[in-house]
Image: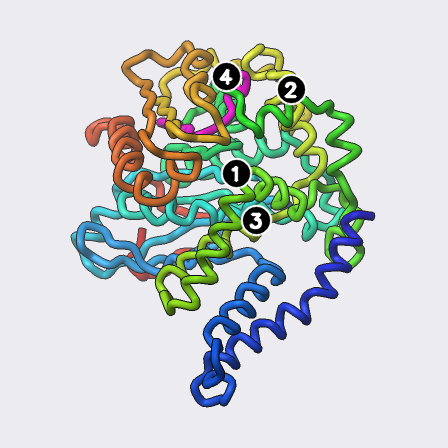
Amino acid sequence: MLYQLYETQRSLMEPFSDLAEVASRMFTNPVLPFAQLPLAQRISAAYDLMHRLGKDYEKPEFGLRTVNVDGIDVAIHERVEIDKPFCELRRFKRFSDDPDTLTKLKVQPVVLVVAPLSGHYATLLRDTVRTLLGDHKVYITDWKNARLVPMAEGEFHLDDYINYVQSFIRYLQGTYGNCHVMSVCQPTVPVLAAISLMASRKEKLPLSMTMMGGPIDARKSPTAVNNLAMQRSHEWFENNVIYRVPDKFPGAGRRVYPGFLQHSGFVAMNPDRHAKSHYDYFEDLIRGDNESAEAHRKFYDEYNAVLDMDADYYLETIRTVFQDFNLVHGTWEVKSERGKVERVRPQDIRGVGLLTVEGELDDISGSGQTAAAHDLCTGIPKAHSKHYEAKGAGHYGIFSGRRWREMVYPVVKQFIAEHEPKPETAPARKRTSARSRTSTPRS
């Protein structure tokens, strides 16, 4: 019922939000007499803020058109490589007509970025992808909004998430010979499980796995997020945050953890900071500081865009990761695509590089939670494992912004390069793909 009430309220507010946007433009249009009135700039700013507080935020675009590769601008074509019911494997294909650049692009490492399915869209990792593209072939998991997935597609469980990741890894291995895997925040746990299961089956493994700011062992330095999950029972979450999708959406009837509830939780963690940010935006508009105002818009266009998560996946994640700690206790069992139940054994992983990254000021995944992966992956020698703490970086700072680009990325880039096969032993990279190729030079 709460979901229906929210959608009704949002529908009622939408016309007023649109009117506020129109009014804001009227008071800044020099052709209209409204712009000549006293306090016109302040009135326009107030209407603009009202519009942004009341508008509906849709899924943003990655919007990556070009990337600089050693001083050469390379065109980017974004496309869906694999389309599954709850996720798309998205590729950022690079094109160049410069022979030297093309040669360089063809031999660069392949990286699968596993984006979080924890409220925001994969576009939250836009800066991560943009930076990686300068030196790597990049694919990303783009998780779908559960309210847009018809009931006919079935349920989505944490086991399905793990099976999806494995299928993407196998696809890249089949296409290129091998790949590297990077997981950011929430997916560090299912990615470690996915690779552990592949290791236990003696499957071919990725060359390296980079795990950034994730709750491998949520018992260490628990944050407010961890405490909420640990202090509330499984039944509390099922009874208080799970609702059915209203009739107006393709996924009508599906049980989900709604995006609007998640967003409320995000804001509640730092309400003063968000209030100040909106007030600063209001003042920037009054002063005519368009650069600062645009930076605010870009951040909140991303931050306010949230998706619904399938209830089964969400509840199983809460129980497995934050309540029962199945991964660190060695009691996690996962059902494979073929229906076989298998035990997750990180100690079986061998021949894979392991890099963990944490932010010194991370208030989402506390200190030591991600580094715990090294204690679990006992089959990986110290020579092929590394932990890095980004000084002064919060949760978002380890994968987006200046600290990511200047501090974290150089470590990630070097680690991946160190775990690429040597030229004399590197397997020939296949050039076939699920899609037909054109004659245009690309990588």
Earlier sequence position, callout 4 versus callout 3: 3
Residue of label 1:
116
Query: Which disc number belongs to residue 183?
Result: none
Mark 1 or 4: in front is 4
Which secondary structure lies at badge 4?
loop
Q: Magenta stretch: residue 381 in it?
A: no
| Numbered range of the magenta stretch | 207-220
For marks 3 and 2, give the CA distance: 32 Å
Q: Residue at x 30, y 32 (%)?
A: 412
Rendered view: 9 above or below 273: below
Q: From this viewpoint, is residue 212 visible?
A: yes
Q: Which residue is mark 2?
A: 323
Please state which of residues 225 and 64 is positioned toward the viewer in this rendering: 225
Query: Sequence-wise, which precedes: disc 3 or disc 2?
Result: 3
User: At label 2, which amino acid type do we have?
Assistant: Gln
Gap between marks 4 and 3 measured at Cα: 36 Å
Ranked by sequence position, the earlier of labels 1 and 2 is: 1
Tell me if residue 439 comes above or below residue 137 in the rendering: below
Label 4 vs label 3, nearer the camera: 4
Nearer mark to the viewer, of 1 and 3: 1
Write down the residue under mark 4.
220
Q: Quadrant of residue 295?
A: bottom left
Is label 1 in contact with label 2 (beta carbons under 8 Å)?
Answer: no
Residue at 52% across, 38% down: 116
Q: CA distance from mark 4 to mark 2?
A: 13 Å
The secondary structure that most of the magenta stretch takes on is loop
Provide the secondary structure element on which disc 1 rests. loop
Q: Amino acid at mark 3?
A: Asp
Up/down of 50 relative to 182, above or below: below
The three-letter code of the residue at mark 4 reads Lys
- N-terminal of the pair, mark 4 or mark 2, is 4
